[in-house]
Every structure is written in C-alpha cells, then in structure tokens.
C-alpha cells in the first residue's frame, strides 16, 4: 500500500504529524506492507526519526546517474543513503512534464542497478469504444520495462493508474470489474514478455481515487496486490481506514 504524498504537505511539521498518524495505524497491521513516498526534502528527517519496521520509504522520482553535475536532480545512491527502498518511476504527472518511455526505462534501470525497487506507472489518458487504450498500455508497459532482465522482473512493481481516474473521487474511479479486466490484461502482457515463473511474481497496484469507500470493491474484484493512494493518503484517518480494510480482506 503506497501513499504518494506528491508535493504535500508544505511544512515538515505537517509531514511529521501525518507520518505519525499513519504510523499509528500501520504498526497494527500484520498482512499489509505500508510504503510512504514523501517529497525528497522530507524523506531523511522522517526516516531518521522512524525506528519501526512496518513502514518503508519510497521516492517519487530519481535521476539516472549516481553522482555528478546534474543540477536539481537526486541520485539513487542518495536515496539509498536515507533508507529509501522503493522508487515511483514514470508517474503520469512526471510524464506530463515531458518524461517519455525511454527516460522511464533508463530510470527503471538505474533503480534496479542500485538495489532499489521500481514502482513503474502506466495508464491511459482516456478510453474509447475501439479499445485503443489496450494497445497504448501494452506499448507503454513494454517500453518502460525495456531494459529489465528476465531475472529481475519479478521484483518490479507495476502501478496501473488511468489518468482519467486520478485526483477525483471514489465515484469517478474505476470499478472493480473494469480493474479486473485490466489487471488480467497486464498479467498477460507480462507473461508473454517474460517467463511465467518470473512474471507471476510481479506485483500490480492500482492508483486513481482510491478512497475508503471503494477500497473493498477494488480489492475484492480488481485482482490487484495493492494500491497507490494520492489524495486520500494526506489524511491519516482516511489512509488508516484504507489500510485497515485491506488488512481485513487479505
Ligand atoms: P489520487 O492519486 O489517489 O489522488 O487519484 C493517485 C496517484 O496519482 O498516484
């Protein structure tokens, strides 16, 4: 269960309060892995202060090089140094800023080369009756994982995040049935590309307006391993209630 805080909260003080609220819920869970992706700035103070084992840290992006003259960028080694385990790569909000599939593929490579776990995001902008979004997802997924070796693919996490469902509300998100179709489709693409043995270990998450109200349906019917939660993860109570629901259904 990944909390993607995006460019929130605006102060460390609020980030710490949010973290502590989520920690109180997450520490009771036995079957759920909770991952928090704060802004780059807030990762280190949060990870230094956290002594538990239930929460892992993720970064929301990374650069492809380990060190050097790349103004404004953050390297995978710097992330490792502050106890980051996962890196979100190719989120649609980054793709909208110009990141294409080959940049995403290079970032996935850099993440794996440094012993971190990539959470690779894919998702269509819109859907139509012709089903062209299926071809789009296939191309985007294959291109984003282009440099991943067979032996590594099992550790990759794929996050399916249709753009039309992001940042809305539970009513506008996907329903469980639609999600089930898409998760089967993504599994099939992965099994066609890699051997079954490795592809079956790939965890698939769904992201796009996951809220306490639709958690149950999406998890029961959607056939996914977890969720990438944006706005609902900025409220400890809401995110805690999503976590508790997942725990009770797993
Ligand atoms: P949302 O964001 O839960 O606010 O829709 C999900 C995401 O963009 O990762």
Image (cartoon, helix red, strand yellow):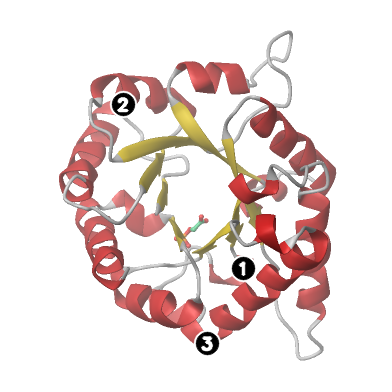
Give the crowd class for mark 1: few <14, some 14-19, many >=20 residues within 10 Å.
many
Q: Left or right of 189: which side holds 176? A: left
State the quadrant of the C terminus. Answer: bottom left
Quadrant for residue 89, please give it.
Answer: top right
Residue 46 circle label = 2
Estimate the spatial distance between the alpha carbons at disc 1 and disc 2, rounded to whole Å.
30 Å
Name the residue beneath numbered marker 3. 177
**Callout in the foreground (3, 1):** 3
Please, what secondary structure does the residue beneath circle 1 have? loop
State the quadrant of the N terminus. Answer: bottom left
Q: Residue at x 57, y 32 (%)?
A: 116
Please, what secondary structure does the residue beneath circle 3 have? helix
Q: Earlier in the sequence, mark 3 or mark 1?
A: 1
Any part of residue 103 in sight: yes
Q: Position of residue 96 (x, y in %)?
A: 70, 50
Quadrant for residue 35, please give it.
Answer: top left
Q: Residue at x 40, y 26 (%)?
A: 43
Mark 3 vs ligand 1: CB below 8 Å = no
Mark 1 vs ligand 1: CB below 8 Å = no
Name the residue beneath numbered marker 1. 162
């Amino acid at each position: 269960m990944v909390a993607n805080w995006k460019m929130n909260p605006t102060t460390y003080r609020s980030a710490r309060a949010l973290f502590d609220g989520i920690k109180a819920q997450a520490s009771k869970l036995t079957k759920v892995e909770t991952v928090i992706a704060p802004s780059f700035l807030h990762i280190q103070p949060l990870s230094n202060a956290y002594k538990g084992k239930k929460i892992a840290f993720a970064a929301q992006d990374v650069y492809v090089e380990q060190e050097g003259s790349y103004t404004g960028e953050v390297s995978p080694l710097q992330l490792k140094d502050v106890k980051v385990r996962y890196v979100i790569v190719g989120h649609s909000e980054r793709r909208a800023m110009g990141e294409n599939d080959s940049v995403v593929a290079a970032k996935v490579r850099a993440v794996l080369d440094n012993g971190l776990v990539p959470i690779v995001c894919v998702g269509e902008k819109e859907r139509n009756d012709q089903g062209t979004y299926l071809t789009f997802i296939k191309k985007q997924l294959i291109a984003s994982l282009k440099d991943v070796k067979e032996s590594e693919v099992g550790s990759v996490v794929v996050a399916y995040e249709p753009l039309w469902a992001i940042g809305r509300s539970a009513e506008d998100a996907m329903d469980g049935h639609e999600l089930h179709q898409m998760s089967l489709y993504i599994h099939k693409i992965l099994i066609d590309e890699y051997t079954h043995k490795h592809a079956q270990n790939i965890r698939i998450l769904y992201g796009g307006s996951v809220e306490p109200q639709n958690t149950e349906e999406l998890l029961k019917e959607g056939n996914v391993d977890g969720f990438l939660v944006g706005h609902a993860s900025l409220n400890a109570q809401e995110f805690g209630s999503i976590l508790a629901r997942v725990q009770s259904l797993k």
